[in-house]
């Protein structure tokens, strides 16, 4: 999946397959999501809200927990699917899912006043936009167009 590239300034510039780029970008995006959530535990009053059965304005319930896990399971699976799906299907699924998660990332920052959440959301949107970009610009074979 890694092709030999050119030599620039004495350094080999290896061409990385788009599937590996997508998997790496999904992984990086998930790290940002996880770290934003971990840092949120340090916000004053957050632990008290959890102990009272609330996360943001939502009641902690099985439905909430299932929804939260489902929301994060899709990008986790996208790491594998980016490597395993055939190119044409991969491209369409990747652009669709990343587009949905751009909206999720923006929605998660609405009404927030803490700068780290805005930075996290901005980073997520940039990473997800790169996912869409790389999928959109998927290399084609000569004569495929």
Image: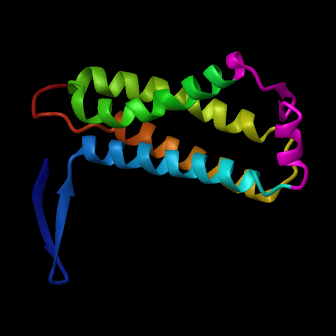
Of the 4 image quadrants, the one containing the C terminus is top left
Left or right of 20 in this view: 3:
left
**Residue toward you, 131 or 61:** 61
Location of residue 86 with respect to 141 vertically, above or below: above
Left or right of 50 in this view: 101:
left
**Residue toward you, 38 or 123:** 38
Left or right of 138 in this view: 119:
right
Left or right of 108 in this view: 132:
left
Q: Position of residue 138 (x, y in %)?
A: 28, 37
So how many labels did they put on this image?
Answer: 0
Identify the residue at the far top of this view. 63
- Confirm whether the magenta stretch covers residue 56: yes
**Residue toward you, 63 or 57:** 63
At x 30%, y 26%, the residue is 90
Q: Position of residue 86 (x, y in %)?
A: 20, 24
Location of residue 101 with respect to 23 vertically, above or below: above
Query: Residue 9 appears in which quarter of the rendering?
Result: bottom left
At x 49%, y 29%, the residue is 73
Q: How is the image coloured?
A: rainbow
- Confirm whether the magenta stretch covers residue 38: no
Location of residue 56 with respect to 93 vertically, above or below: below
At x 59%, y 46%, the residue is 33
At x 59%, y 44%, the residue is 125
Query: Residue 101 appears in which quarter of the rendering?
Result: top right
Location of residue 48 with respect to 42 vertically, above or below: above
The residue range painted magenta reads 44-64
């Amino acid at each position: 999946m890694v092709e030999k590239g050119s030599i620039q300034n004495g350094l080999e510039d290896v061409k990385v397959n788009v599937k590996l780029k997508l998997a790496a970008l999904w992984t990086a995006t998930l790290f940002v999501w996880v770290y934003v959530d971990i840092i949120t535990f340090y916000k004053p009053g957050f632990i008290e809200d959890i102990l009272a059965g609330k996360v943001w304005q939502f009641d902690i319930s099985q439905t909430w927990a299932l929804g939260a896990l489902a929301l994060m399971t899709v990008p986790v699976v996208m790491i594998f699917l980016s490597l395993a799906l055939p190119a044409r299907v991969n491209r369409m699924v990747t652009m669709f899912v990343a587009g949905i998660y751009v909206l999720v990332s923006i929605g998660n920052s609405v009404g927030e006043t803490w700068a780290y959440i805005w930075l996290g959301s901005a980073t997520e949107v940039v990473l997800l936009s790169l996912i869409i970009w790389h999928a959109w610009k998927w290399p084609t074979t000569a004569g495929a167009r």
